[in-house]
Image (cartoon, rainbow, N blue to C red):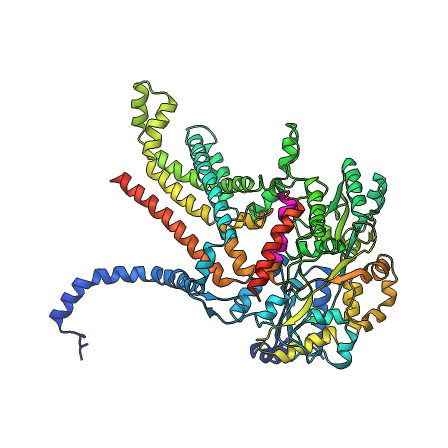
Amino acid sequence: MKNHPPVHWLKSIIACLCLFPAVCFGQGIQFWKFGSASDSANQGLAKWVDQWNKENPRKPVQIRFFPFDEYMNGTLLTTAFASESGPDIFWASRGTFLQYAKGGVLADLSDLLTGEAKQDFSQPSIDAITVDGKEYAMPFEQEPVALLYNTDLLQKAGVQVPKTWDELLAACEKLKAAHLIPIVIEPQPGAYENFTWYPFLWQTGSDVTNPEMTKATFDSPGTAKALDLWRTLIQKGYAPRTATDITANVVSTPFGSGQAAMEVVGMWAIQQLQSAAPNIKFDFAPLPTPNGANPITIYGGWSQAINAKSKNLALAKEFTAWMWVKGTERPVEWCTKLNSKFSPRKSVLAAAKSFYDQKYLNTFRDVILPTARAEPRYPSALVEIIGDTLQAAMFRNEPGAQAASEGQKKIAAFLNSNH
Amino acid sequence: MSFKPLMNASRGTSFSARHAEPITGYLFLLPDFLGLLIFLIIPIGYAFLISLHDWNGLSSMRWNGLDNYVKLFSDSQFWDSLKITGIYTLIYVPVLYAVSLGLALLVNQRLPFMRFFRTIFFVPVVLSLVVSSLMWKYIFDERSGLLNFLIGFLGIQPQPWLGSVQLALPSIIVVSVWIQMGYFMVIFIAGLQDIPREYYEAARIDGANRWQMFLRITLPVLKPTSLFVIVISLIASFQVFDQVWVMTKGGPARATEVTALYIYQQAFQYLNLGYGSAVAFVLFVVILSFSLIQFRLLRTDRS
């Protein structure tokens, strides 16, 4: 029998009519994510969304991608939430999580994290998304920071991987003399710059505040030393003063183009370099410490949040649970194929054991992750003060002790005004 | 049946005659007025209302009266940003004036290819600010930028243009002048072409040289145009944002944090929309004051 064109048209019309109610009566949800649609990780997410939509045609999910800068530092999410046209699902970093939680934007996800499901998550990952005893986001990744180095460049310059701060500075001097860019650190102020600097602060035994965040502890010899280290890296020309993009995107940095020998960056760089800069021979080492002993690093990671004013809260929760809580298939794919990250879930780490046995990842699992502290959850005002202090040391050549003292005053004033 | 007029004939005719023209005029103005009302006046009014509240844009507004304005006067970062904006203005406006006038004088001559040069100088005006800023960001790159490559031929060491607290603001000023010089060049060309040639001929006969003709004829006759250029460029300089956001984001160490950027950061990064609106209003008052002073000068000069 011939297929008559009108039969095809009829099928299309019926398909549209089936979708029409779902689309037009607001049963679908919007998932907003940063990055380009062509990023391999985002392609993977888009594939998941397609899979969900095929399996659940009456519960459509639409994923949209936005430039990272606009997502993190721009007006996108703020104006969307203020005008009640925000996405149903979005991602929050530790740097922004508190802002959204205190602003009442985040839906309570405690019902997704109960019993066995909750036990499967590491306690620090649950603590990171808990406010007043309730969970307000879904953690799904952990990314420790380490010292990334180009094995060829270090060998060419006759430099060993530094273990102490003095060795780091000596290595930088030698690399600079060999006309190489010694090291890349984040030069732009913001949560990411602070995030990559905190390990150096902690390695000296210092911290920004006491654990209860009631007292500033910033003004200490250790803080001064940590500030002076980054001040030296910039002032002596060991690290570039500017960057075309956030240095978390390692491919866009001089390291990614084979010009820099070292970079302070997270575990996500493994997958980035393997897919976009396969010619670069690299490895990871723990961050250098003041005396070579007691290494400390940091780990961060995004968490998935749901808009408390979503018109389809149930669907948003169902989709989030399907992505990150039900089974291990998608979390394993996220951490091992689409990215190189750890999962906060024990069952996922177990299921992906053979992946973490591989080169680079075994270093992170066995050597670096055990020394990692969770990224602190500071209010934006505190992030700003710490950033200003670091920038003053790096770019105004302010001695660490002076910068630490001024930072202390501002942090103390902020803590006093909030208690 | 005949159509009954709304009013009797004698009264209707007199009303129409008196009011037809003004009504028609107002009707023509109405669309523009509605646009100004909806897209300018109401949003400004609402922004002022927000400035009287504590609001993070996510939860509901909380009235706090003039607290944001009180906070502003003791906010050292606000005053620093105003100082940086002031320095930017003090350098940008005169440099832009001199460059645009200089270009206008050059391309206003009756020489071959002048139209080509006028077009070339105008190209930056039609480029998007973001595109221009991104292009210059790469030109200023300390490692692989074109500028450091060129100055290398002069034996000058590569400079961290956008990464230096001393050089970042001048670098942005250069970009701003480059972007706008074509626009004001065209304004000056129109002014120059309005100057009667007889003035120059008479001056030549009297033995005046080119510099004297420029000082005694060109500049005085161009005064209204000059004041217009200064007013517009001054207002624009207080509102500079795009170049700074793309090239330095206010860094390094807040060396280029102009007030418009400070407002943006307060409102959208730190979610202090109430406070950001208050700073925006103070900036509005500053700009308005400068503009009124200049308009007053212009009116005095004309009278």
Query: Compared with residue B220, is residue A397 higher up or lower down, i.e. above or below?
Result: below
Q: Would residue B34 appear left or right of A379 to someone viewing this image?
A: left
Please state the total of marks drawn on the protein image. Answer: 0
| Residue A251 image offset from top left, x and y in percent | 73, 51
Residue range in magenta is A383-396
Query: Outermost residue, left direction?
Result: B10
**What is the magenta segment's predominant secondary structure?**
helix
Q: Indicate the position of residue A66 as horizontal and vertical percent values.
A: 62, 61
Task: Tell me if B134 is positioned left or right of A278 in this view.
Answer: left
Relative image position of residue B57 (x, y in whole percent):
52, 67
Q: Is residue A11 visible?
A: no
- The quadrant of the image that shows the C terminus of chain A is bottom right
Q: Is residue B63 above or below residue B224?
A: below
Please tell me which residue lies in front, B56 or B14. B56
Is residue B77 shown in magenta? no
Q: Could you tell whether A332 is left or right of B5 in the image?
A: right
